[in-house]
Structure formats: C-alpha cells, structure tokens
Amino acid sequence: MYNVERLVESAEEMDKQLRITFERIKGLLAEKGNIMGSRLKELYDSQYKDSLSFESFGYPRLLPFLQDGESLHCFHLNHSPGQDVQICLRKEDSNYNVSSSGHLKRNLENMSS
C-alpha cells in the first residue's frame, strides 16, 4: 500500500526543486544574455556547481523541460523545428537583477530610468 502523504510530499519537493532550477536559469540569462539550449547544461553546471539533470524531473528531452519553464513564465523560447532552442529572459524580467541563487530582485536603477 502506498503512503499518500509521502507521495504528496515527494511531488511538492520535486515542484520546489524544479522552480529553483528555472530561477537559476533566469539568473544565467540575466548574467549572460540569451543562451542556446545546447550550452545550457555546461553553463548551469559551471555557474551553480550543480548538475542540471532535467531527466531527474521526468523529462525525456530538454525541449519539453524548457517548454514547461516557459509555460510557468520563467523565460521565453525562440526555436524552429530541427534547430537548437534559444532561451531568452522575458521582457517583464529585464528590470530585475537575479542573484547567484536565482532569486529575482528589483533593480532600482532600472526603475528610475
């Protein structure tokens, strides 16, 4: 018999970790500008000293993982079939600074300009 409470806790923890991962990707975008999907893992692993493993969230490929981040309004994707995907910071987030942990902070200098 399954422990339903434990399953719910596990799902909530996975959701939290996924959101942290997407916030970290935003941090990379704020620091580096647009990133190609083929370079994302290399940049992520280097910046955060943590391995980006979208497979651990149950995604078989990178694109569905990134599309879920886009649907959560974490970033914007530019792609065409058969080509690499470009990950871009959303315009709405351009007035924010992102700390190395991936946390967004309002940039007061950008607000006054």
Image: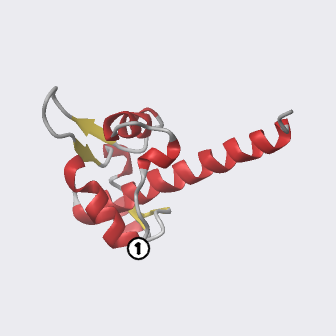
Relative to residue 52, is residue 42 drawn left or right? Answer: left
| Residue lying at 51% horizontally and 44% vertically, measured from the top left | 57
Can residue 113 be seen by looking at this rendering? no
Q: Position of residue 15 (x, y in %)?
A: 60, 45
Determine the residue located farthest toward the top in the rendered image. Answer: 81
Q: Quadrant of residue 98?
A: bottom left
Tell me how the rendering is colored: secondary structure
Relative to residue 60, is residue 11 drawn left or right? Answer: right
Q: Position of residue 107 (x, y in %)?
A: 40, 65
Determine the residue located farthest toward the front in the rendered image. Answer: 1
Q: Position of residue 82 (x, y in %)?
A: 13, 29
Determine the residue located farthest toward the left in the rendered image. Answer: 83
Name the quadrant of the N terminus: top right
| Residue lying at 36% horizontally and 44% vertically, measured from the top left | 75
Relative to residue 37, is residue 48 drawn left or right? Answer: right
75 or 41: nearer the eye?
41
| Residue lying at 47% horizontally and 55% vertically, measured from the top left | 21
Can residue 73 be seen by looking at this rendering? yes
Instruction: Give the residue type at disc 1.
Output: Lys
Relative to residue 40, is residue 24 drawn left or right? Answer: right
Total numbered labels placed on residues in the image: 1
Q: Residues within 10 Å of mark 1 (few under 14, many from 20)?
A: few
| Residue lying at 71% horizontally and 46% vertically, measured from the top left | 10
Q: Dot 1 corresponds to which residue?
A: 49
76 or 65: nearer the eye?
65
Q: Position of residue 32 (x, y in %)?
A: 23, 63
Q: Quadrant of residue 63?
A: top left
